[in-house]
Image (cartoon, rainbow, N blue to C red):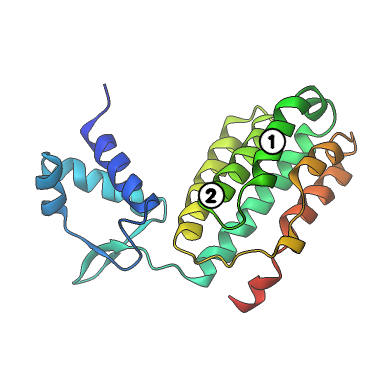
Amino acid sequence: MQSLSQTVYDELLRRLMENKLTPGEILNRRDIAKELGVSVAPVLEAILQLEAEGFLESIPRKGTQVRLIRSDDIIGRLVIREALECQAARMYCGNAVKINEEKLIQLAQKADHALLGSRQNWETEIAFHRALIALTDCAVLIDEFDKVMKLNLFYAINRFVPLHKESEIDKHEELVKNLQIKDADQAEKIIRRHLYIGKGYLSSI
């Protein structure tokens, strides 16, 4: 049975991801507890977890608010994502990609055909890259990727990450073919290039 704190966490995260709680908005613990029919204790636990994950922040004499998105946050998460994906590519390149090619191509096509800048676009891209990460069979690496991408999706939903131009997008289906090489150094270069394409806007954040 799911704990009350997890139930509250799931509900607050849902509101964050549906843009019902936006950056700068103050959270009242007692109001949330009353609305959800729980005590303040599980609300506090959920809030502390969301603070640790980077969604909320505590402001002295003001309370808890949805974290304001700063340029350092965006750039920092992209750096972490790059480190995770490049290491993962070194681990799964070659046979693992070839064996799972059919599934990866299906996910790649969904990502490539989703409307650019839409929520579906972000979610299908994340699903594709998570499938690649999962090929490492490294639970810690997969978990860290999930944490990073959950925040990246939040940034995207709130339009803090500028949209790519169509001409700057590197096709995911082509990436599946390219990552079937067995050279780890080359695989790392391929995934790094993929992540870098369309990120020229970072200098202006």
In this picture, is 143 found above or below 16? above
Kindly identify the residue that appears in the image at 59 percent across and 38 percent down.
127
Left or right: 140 in relation to 106: left
Disc 1 is placed on an element classified as: helix
Left or right: 148 in relation to 79: left
Query: Quarter-wise, where is residue 90 in the image?
Result: top right
Kindly identify the residue that appears in the image at 82 percent across and 43 percent down.
174
Kindly identify the residue that appears in the image at 29 percent across and 47 percent down.
12
Whichever of labels 2 and 1 marks the residue nearer the N terminus, that label is 1
Q: Quadrant of the N terminus?
A: top left
Kindly identify the residue that appears in the image at 58 percent across and 36 percent down.
142
Closer to us: 103 or 154: 103
In this picture, is 132 found above or below 199? above
Left or right: 190 in relation to 156: right
Name the amino acid type tagged 1.
Leu
Closer to us: 146 or 22: 22
